[in-house]
Amino acid sequence: MKNIVIWGTGVIGRSLYYNLCGGGYNVKYFVDNAQRDVFYNCKVLRPTKENCSKYLVVVASNLYYEDIAIQLMEYGLEELKDYIPYQALGKKIVILHGNCHIGIIKSYLNTSKSFKDKYYIYSIPMIQHNKKGYIKEHLLSNCDVFIYQDIQADNQYDIRLSEEYLLPKVRNMKICIPNIYGMGKIFYPQAKKGKEDCLWSNPSGREIPGGLFNFRDENIDSLWRKGERKIEKIVEYLRGPIYDKENVKNEFEHMFSKMEEREKHWDVKILEYIKQNYKKQQMFYEPAHPCNNILRKISEEILVMLDIDINELQEIEESFGVSEMPIYKCVKEALELKFERKYIRNVPPIEESKLTEKDMDLKEYCREYCYWCFEWLD
């Protein structure tokens, strides 16, 4: 029976103690900044270095976890070694590091009962939200499994978030997963980033790059600059042979060749799956964001490496669909895509993907694009 200390005598502390009674843990005492002496016949001590250093401290709080962690670090204690969040008790600690794709993978993994019974995913910011530009070293050294994308040293955020910097600090299991951010460009040659981006919040109030449009459409922008103001004319042009078929195919092959070099370094492979399925299933919503089928496949391969049955995975919402772009007819023909998408962005929440609840076909997409990006309504 393992001796532990519970920090917290609130609702979570009560629930935790109830569930531990008769189990494999012996609660030696509670610690809490609140003034009380006894809690369910257990002593309640003031948090001091001595009281928190004898046994593993289980922090029974969500709201005040960071404040408590700071206090424990001031005592010289290490997170995930000397103290843990209550959800991690009895489980192995997993850290997921990478871009926005990581959030979907985390959701998939947590649909597996066997995974949740054995592992706890310790949350850290996605790379684009990591304002500090680093991951605490004790988290890297004390976690049991580090699942990471191959973030390069010259990334736009900080070298301290790159695999080159992080991996030497990880002591235990490492799993490198695909970083396919940008690979979707092969299906959306019209997509552009640059100084014309509309850095506005979308109608729901969420601050996301581009608001409703993460990427500009170079063809709509070009027509607009030339004075075209008829939505029907814009739609007609987009349905035409804008891009040369051979160029589309060559760009496709070039992208795969480049990604194949990177995949040699990944523990989880994904390119063969994309090659076998891209004609019959949509793979990306726009250049940066893959569909759930790709991220589910990556999640399945992670479970295989952890010796967990992949059949336990459940489906989750297609949240990246809120930023979907149309695939041009000429691209579909060049790449021989067989799947049909009459309407796009038909995923919840509607207020984060479009301006109206009506179905978004190519005409509605162009109409909302012109309204959003040029403040113009046909």
Image (cartoon, rainbow, N blue to C red):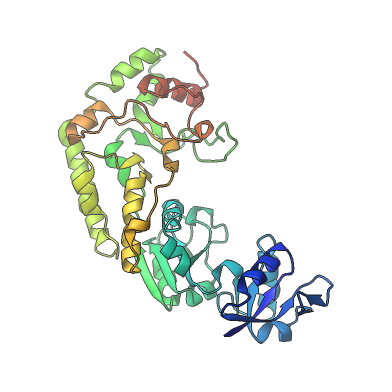
Residue that sits furthest to the left in the current view? 246
* Horizontal relation, residue 51 to residue 98: left or right: right
Count numbered badges in the picture: 0
- Across and down, in percent, residue 148 comes to 40, 63
At 39% across and 12% down in the image, what residue appears?
A: 230
Nearer to me, 270 or 254: 270
- Across and down, in percent, residue 162 comes to 42, 64
- Across and down, in percent, residue 40 comes to 76, 74
At 39% across and 69% down in the image, what residue appears?
A: 164
At 38% across and 55% down in the image, what residue appears?
A: 313
At 42% across and 71% down in the image, what residue appears?
A: 145
255 w.r.t. 363: above or below: below
User: In this view of the protein, can residue 128 be seen by the observer?
Assistant: yes
377 w.r.t. 168: above or below: above
**Residue 344 found in image quarter:** top left
Nearer to me, 227 or 244: 244
- Across and down, in percent, residue 368 comes to 46, 23
* Horizontal relation, residue 175 to residue 99: left or right: left
User: In this view of the protein, can residue 180 be seen by the observer?
Assistant: no
* Horizontal relation, residue 258 to residue 233: left or right: left
50 w.r.t. 90: above or below: below
Nearer to me, 219 or 350: 350
Nearer to me, 47 or 162: 47
**Residue 191 found in image quarter:** top left
Q: Quadrant of the N terminus?
A: bottom right
